[in-house]
Image (cartoon, rainbow, N blue to C red):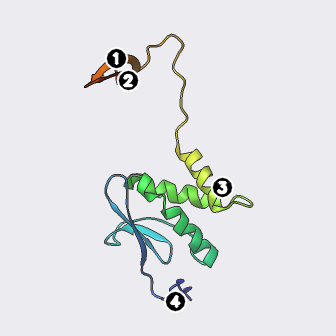
Amino acid sequence: MMNACSCGELKSHVIIRRSTADGAIACLWSDGYVSNRLGASVVGKFEAKTDRQRESMRAAFEEVGLLDWAELPRFVREWKRARKLVGATDVTARAEVWRRMTPPTKAAPEGADSLYRESSCNMGTHDRPSLIRVR
C-alpha cells in the first residue's frame, strides 16, 4: 500500500519543481523520486515512507538550485547516507552532504605567484585598490 502525501493524494505527483544551477528543471515527486520535468529521467530516490522522511526530502530539495543536473544523483545518495547518521537532523545532514561533496582545497605552494594582485584602477572620480586577475 502506498502512503498518502501530506496533501492526501495517494497517486504519485510532483510536489516541488526547482531549477538547477545549469538551468535544468528538477522535480521532486511525492514518492521520493527526483526526475526531470517530464518525469522521464529519474536520478535518485529519497526515503518517503513517513511524514518525517518527506519533510527531510523537501528540506534537501531546497539545495537543488546550487547543483548542476549531473550532481543530483550523488547529492541524493549523500543525503540519504547523512540522514542515517545517529541523531542526524536536516541541518547536520546538510552540513555533512556539503562536506562530502566539496573537494578539499589545496594551499598554494610557498613562493608561488598569486592569481590575484593588488593594483590601482581608475573608477571615474574614485581611485581605490581593487583585485584584478593576472594570467
Task: Give the residue type at disc 2.
Answer: Ser
What residue did someone put label 1 on?
120
Q: Which mark is residue 61?
A: none
Task: Give the residue type at disc 1.
Answer: Ser
Packing grade of label 2 (10 A; few <14, some 14-19, many >=20) is some
Which type of secondary structure does the marked residue at label 1 adopt?
A: strand
Which type of secondary structure does the marked residue at label 3 adopt?
A: helix
Whichever of callouts 4 and 2 sits on the residue coming sooner in the sequence is: 4
What residue did someone put label 4 on?
8
Say which residue appears at 54% left-offset and 13% top-offset.
Answer: 110
Tell me the mark number nearer the camera, choosing from 3 and 1.
Answer: 1
Q: CA distance from mark 4 to mark 1?
A: 62 Å
> In the displayed structure, does residue 86 sit left or right of residue 38?
right
- 116 in relation to 27, above or below: above
Q: CA distance from mark 3 to mark 1?
A: 43 Å
Tell me the mark number nearer the camera, choosing from 4 and 2.
Answer: 2
Circles 3 and 1, Cβ within 8 Å, touching? The answer is: no
> In the displayed structure, does residue 92 sit left or right of residue 8?
right
> In the displayed structure, does residue 131 sit left or right of residue 104?
left
Circles 2 and 1, Cβ within 8 Å, touching? The answer is: yes
Q: CA distance from mark 2 to mark 1?
A: 6 Å
Say which residue appears at 70% left-offset and 58% top-offset.
Answer: 85
What residue did someone put label 3 on?
92
Say which residue appears at 62% left-offset and 61% top-offset.
Answer: 90
Packing grade of label 1 (10 A; few <14, some 14-19, many >=20) is few
Q: CA distance from mark 3 to mark 4?
A: 29 Å
Say which residue appears at 54% left-offset and 27% top-offset.
Answer: 106
Whichever of callouts 2 and 1 sits on the residue coming sooner in the sequence is: 1
Packing grade of label 4 (10 A; few <14, some 14-19, many >=20) is few
